[in-house]
Image (cartoon, coloured by chain):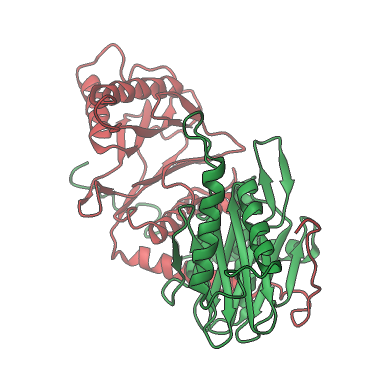
Chain colours: A red, B green
């Protein structure tokens, strides 16, 4: 499994990904799922990947090859980030079809991607590319997109992220979201990669790689656990805890 | 959808359930999913239900009928709570098979249950009954069981619940877990039912019904939101936030 999230706020973008891959519980490996494809002062485009590892690697490889060979359509020639998402979607569907074998087995090597970044003269944007190749865009009302094991880490994003949040806070929130997921699903695991992109910089921003035993990750975990416990202790007591009214739904 | 959770600690049990049911987004209703079947000073047995509403209602009805008619096997004659779980599982599979029509459609009216309570002379226990009729038991290492939309509300349970926690705290934690789920999945919704069972009382304990606009629920939500924000603000700052080391996975 995988957990990747990209968050868009006024000051820029934050990307976070775990790096555990598994093909069965006894075949666990570590692979980066964060791929900055272009970062040249004119545009910055980063991919996050989830799903079948052979498919995601093939898509990333093809994308790099198209860049190197100056193919007519590559991540440096696309005019919009939506076009980049379209292109990644097509490569993904192509790879998927190549290896799908519906007749013999149910095997379907599907993959999803997050495509985020900025092209000079345009806004920073984040897209989610579905296994079917179509895509959606993050918006003010939905300032983040996730792929993989998305549920455990969602509540904290919903409560903290807003458009004016400083990038450093967004990054910490992404790490808390990641940590909640790692805690609840053993197939999501460190090292955790984090990249902070400042709007209009048009270059890859600072990138952190946090290993399992990283001091900062440990301090963050401990701080969050203590903070949650405190938040919990300060919650209002149950109404008339000794003898609350016993009430029932009519149709019980 | 549904979210139900039952938690077992040294001092007793806490049951919580939402009461929203939906058959498509335009067919939303309110039904209790918490059913205390026996509460007579010799035993207390409560069911929580998730899944197909026709199946869960049929199972609850049959269980009540078996109690009323003093059927040879009913929730007052079972010797262990595991036997109660077995019995509920059998009723559930029976109902499911009756309406399943694999040949024509993919419709499969499956349901899951939580069976919790205590029989005189034995420990309080909580079981989860799968749609297939088999069951598992909560244990010290896993002091809670959930059915329905289980993921959003899990992280807080993992961080707060332990065997020595007072029942009132367990109840508040169940409400926070419920609230995180309600917030993230629109098909889980109030009123929220909560029941606190004190070990060895052998009778249904205080029960709360919290409507959408309930003052306490509102205060709890607000308190939790503020507490989380505070916990977040107190987290350690990112290491050398201005220029963190740019490090990469070897196989990127």
**Looking at the image, which residue is at 53% across and 36% down?**
B107
**Looking at the image, which residue is at 64% across and 78% down?**
B197
| Residue A178 screen position, x and y as percent | 42, 54
In the image, residue B228 above or below residue A204:
below
Residue B98 in sight here: yes
| Residue B175 screen position, x and y as percent | 64, 65
User: Is A245 on the left-hand or right-hand side of A91?
Assistant: right
**Looking at the image, which residue is at 46% across and 58% down?**
A176
Relative to the observer, which residue lies in front, A143 or A128? A128
Relative to the observer, which residue lies in front, B159 or A194? B159
Relative to the observer, which residue lies in front, B163 or A134? B163
User: Is B251 on the left-hand or right-hand side of A242?
Assistant: left
Q: Give residue A175's quadrant in the image.
A: bottom left
- State how many labels appear: 0
- Of the 4 image quadrants, the one containing the C terminus of chain A is bottom right
User: Is B43 on the left-hand or right-hand side of A147?
Assistant: right
| Residue A231 screen position, x and y as percent | 60, 70
In the image, residue A185 above or below residue A106:
below
| Residue A209 screen position, x and y as percent | 30, 53
In the image, residue B39 above or below residue B48:
below
**Looking at the image, which residue is at 60% across and 57% down?**
B49
Residue A227 in sight here: no
């Amino acid at each position: 499994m995988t957990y990747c999230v990209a968050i868009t706020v006024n000051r820029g973008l934050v990307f976070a990904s775990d790096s555990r891959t598994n093909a069965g519980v006894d075949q666990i490996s570590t692979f980066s799922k964060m791929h900055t494809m272009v970062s040249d002062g004119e545009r910055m485009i980063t991919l996050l990947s989830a799903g079948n590892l052979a498919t995601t690697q093939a898509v990333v490889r093809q994308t790099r090859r198209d860049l190197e060979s100056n193919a007519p359509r590559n991540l440096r020639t696309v005019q919009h980030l939506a076009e980049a998402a379209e292109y990644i979607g097509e490569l993904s569907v192509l790879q998927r079809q190549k290896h799908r074998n519906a007749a013999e087995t149910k095997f379907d090597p599907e993959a999803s991607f997050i495509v985020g970044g900025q092209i000079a003269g345009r806004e920073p944007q984040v897209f989610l590319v579905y296994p079917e190749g179509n895509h959606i865009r993050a918006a003010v009302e939905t300032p983040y997109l996730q792929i993989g094991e998305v549920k455990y880490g969602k509540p904290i994003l919903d409560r903290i992220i807003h458009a004016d949040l400083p990038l450093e806070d967004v990054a910490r929130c992404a790490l808390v979201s990641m940590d909640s997921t790692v805690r609840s699903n053993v197939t999501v695991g460190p090292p955790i990669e984090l990249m902070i992109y400042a709007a209009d910089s048009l270059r890859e921003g600072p990138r952190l790689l946090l290993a399992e035993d990283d001091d900062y990750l440990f301090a963050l975990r401990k701080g969050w656990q203590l903070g949650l416990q405190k938040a919990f202790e300060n919650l209002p007591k149950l109404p008339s805890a000794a003898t609350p009214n016993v009430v029932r739904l009519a149709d019980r």
